[in-house]
Image (cartoon, rainbow, N blue to C red):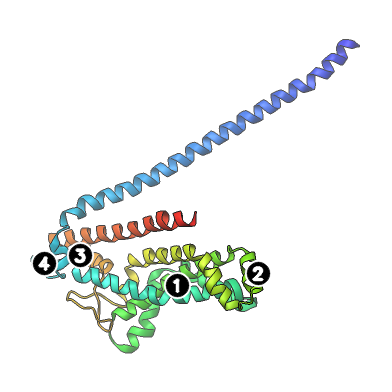
Amino acid sequence: MENRSVSSATGPSTDGWKVNGSLAMRRQFMDRLATTLSLAATSLALLALGSILFTLIVRGAGGLSLMTFTHSTASPGSDGGLANAIVGSIIQTTVSILIGAPLGMLCGIYLADYGRGWMASTTRFVSDMLLSAPSILIGLFIYQIVVAPSGHFSGLAGALALAILALPIVVRTTEDMLRLVPVSLREAGIGLGASKWRVILFICLRAARTGVMTGVLLAVARVAGETAPLLFTSLGNLEWSVSLNRPMASLPVTIYQYAGSAFDDWVQLAWTGALLVTLGVLFINILVRVGFGRKGA
């Protein structure tokens, strides 16, 4: 009887230890497997990005010269550059952000602090749809309402198309950042007698300015490399043009036109333009991650 009681008392504990040990081993194995797969996927992604950057540097660095930044695009063999395309991209991107960023911030403020009911739901739904809409559809839309009625392509039409692409990014970022502002800050401002719009403008936006500016810079990075909407709006221009009422050159369109050319100097300029766009977008992303991320911390 004593042996049976001892065996019955020690048996379940030993079996339980074996079960717990087996479960721990399975969990450890799954953890190592998930870690290995994650590292492998990250390595593949970094390898692909590294190969792209390496190819751009090797193929594009050879065309970097003072002439690239001082001469406009020209006919093959005429020692042309990318000055008009660079300036055109800067102008159209700047105008698009000046249009899209304020509208996006106002819309984000409405959704975060005023939006209620079906109006807010519809606005948020449309913003999310624009965020995932193909850029070529935005270009066709601006073509139908701006270019076709006026009868000519223009840099302003290109800026409007880019502004629509930047708008939902700023809307989503502004709304999310304002919702992260503590309620105590709003209550403190209202308790001091400030009106609601003053609390939003001078307290909430100041507290969320890092995140909002991050969204604006991400919108800049998004629209800076867009090609499809500009093909239907600003079209491109081989001559020097800074007028928003005329067709305007841009780096993405110039790259698209030159990349498939049979002339070696145009192909070289296409690679150089691609390198410049990539470096510009990379610089903006580094600024967002390092500069504003450090302030937010």
Q: 92 above or below 60? A: below
Q: Secondary structure under badge 4?
A: loop
Distance Cα–Cα, label 4 vs label 3? 10 Å
Distance Cα–Cα, label 2 vs label 3? 58 Å
Q: Which residue is mark 4?
A: 76
**Residue at the location (45% across, 40% down)?**
39
Tell me the quarter of the image containing the N terminus: top right
Q: Residues within 10 Å of mark 3 (few under 14, many from 20)?
A: many
Q: Nearer the viewer, mark 4 or mark 2?
A: 2
- Residue 53 or 205: which is nearer the viewer? 205
- Residue 153 or 98: which is nearer the viewer? 98
Q: Secondary structure under badge 1?
A: helix
Distance Cα–Cα, label 4 vs label 2? 65 Å
Position in image of residue 24 (x %, y %)? 64, 30
Q: Secondary structure under badge 2?
A: helix
Position in image of residue 277 (x %, y %)? 28, 61
In the rendered structure, the answer to whether residue 289 lies left or right of residue 151 reads: right
Q: Give amino acid for label 3.
A: Tyr
Q: Give amino acid for label 1.
A: Leu
Q: Nearer the viewer, mark 2 or mark 3?
A: 2
Q: 172 above or below 2? A: below
Q: Residue 187, which numbered label?
A: 2
Q: Which residue is mark 1?
A: 167
Q: Give amino acid for label 2.
A: Glu
- The residue most toward the front is 192
Dot 4 or dot 2: first in sequence order is: 4
Q: Residue 141, which numbered label?
A: none
Distance Cα–Cα, label 1 vs label 3? 30 Å
**Residue at the location (61% across, 28% down)?**
25
Q: Secondary structure under badge 3?
A: helix
Q: Give amino acid for label 4.
A: Pro
Position in image of residue 195 (x %, y %)? 61, 79
